[in-house]
Image (cartoon, rainbow, N blue to C red):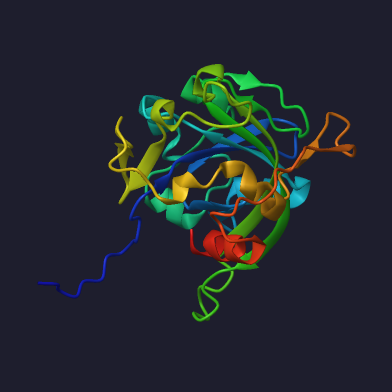
């Protein structure tokens, strides 16, 4: 039996992301968030329009998306009710936030120099993605008094760094999913993914390399930031049914 409910939030389970950005004075901010999803090598981030992170991203067009592992909750809790914005918004004052200038020191995290963007990576995070802002979209346009209070910000992933132990043996550009332990936020609580796959995925029978032509991830930015190197794209496998069916699968998943 199903019943109708109306939760205040709809956090059904999304990965925690620590976004690093550059403040106007050249210092760096870290923001924990979990309204994030990926499509190809682009990512959509849901953020408050007035947050320090949002203002930094719209100004500099650069950021780093750091994915913490499930054993990093103590670091994230130190950031959870802090803000780099001064003065703070009325909501953050009311909900007990505090202003913190040096988020790295406060959260006991280590900055690591990025290759292509100004904001640093977070050394302790097993996955780090340097990114560039492509566009932003106002949310809640149907609510006149809430329009523009939150933004969906689209970023393009420029470079991906992963800890060596996460790489799948025998493959240069694949992740060993059994060794990846991302942290998820589910209705404001932390959860891990677990250590075992539930069942073999039929979608996983398609070699990941077949999606490169669609995602344009065969174009890899080099240190000069403007030079591009195109990696070899493997032919589309017959199991997918050609490019049109691949596009349909990508849209679904």
Residue 223 in sight in this render: yes
| Rendering coords of residue 103 (x, y %) | 55, 29
State left or right for residue 138 relative to residue 230. Answer: left
Q: Which residue is at 47% across, 53% downward?
A: 35
Rendered view: 5 above or below 87: below
Direction left: furthest residue? 1
Rendered view: 80 above or below 235: above
Q: Which residue is at 52% across, 25% downward?
A: 168
Instruction: Specify the quadrant of the image occupied by residue 227.
Output: top right
Tell me the quarter of the image containing the N terminus: bottom left
Residue 41 in sight in this render: no
Judge by depth and name the residue closer to the eye, 187 or 12. Answer: 12
| Rendering coords of residue 211 (x, y %) | 63, 50
Rendered view: 63 above or below 136: above
Q: Which residue is at 47% across, 45% downward?
A: 205
State left or right for residue 225 relative to residue 83. Answer: right
Instruction: Specify the quadrant of the image occupied by residue 161.
Output: top right
| Rendering coords of residue 185 (x, y %) | 36, 45
Q: Which residue is at 50% across, 18% downward?
A: 165
């Amino acid at each position: 039996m199903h019943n109708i409910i109306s939760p205040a939030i709809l956090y059904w389970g999304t990965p925690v992301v620590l976004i690093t950005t550059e403040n106007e004075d050249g210092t760096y901010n870290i923001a924990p968030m979990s309204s994030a999803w990926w499509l190809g090598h682009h990512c959509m981030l849901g953020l408050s329009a007035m947050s320090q992170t949002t203002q930094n991203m719209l100004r500099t067009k650069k950021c780093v998306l750091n994915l913490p592992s499930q054993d990093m909750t103590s670091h994230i809790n130190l950031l959870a009710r802090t803000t780099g914005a001064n003065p703070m918004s009325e909501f953050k004052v009311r909900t007990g936030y505090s202003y913190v200038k040096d988020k790295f020191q406060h959260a006991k995290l280590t900055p690591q120099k990025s290759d292509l963007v100004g904001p640093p990576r977070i050394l302790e995070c097993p996955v780090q993605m340097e990114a560039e802002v492509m566009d932003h979209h106002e949310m809640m346009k149907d609510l006149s008094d809430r329009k523009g209070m939150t933004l969906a910000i689209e970023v393009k992933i420029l470079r991906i760094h992963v800890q060596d132990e996460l790489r799948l043996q025998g493959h240069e550009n694949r992740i060993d999913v059994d060794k990846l332990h991302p942290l998820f936020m589910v209705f404001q609580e932390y959860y891990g993914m677990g250590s075992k796959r539930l069942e073999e995925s039929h979608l996983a029978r398609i070699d990941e390399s077949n999606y490169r032509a669609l995602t344009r991830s065969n174009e890899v930015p080099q240190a000069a930031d403007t030079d591009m190197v195109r990696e070899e794209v493997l032919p589309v496998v017959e199991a997918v049914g050609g490019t049109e069916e691949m596009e349909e699968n990508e849209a679904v998943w």
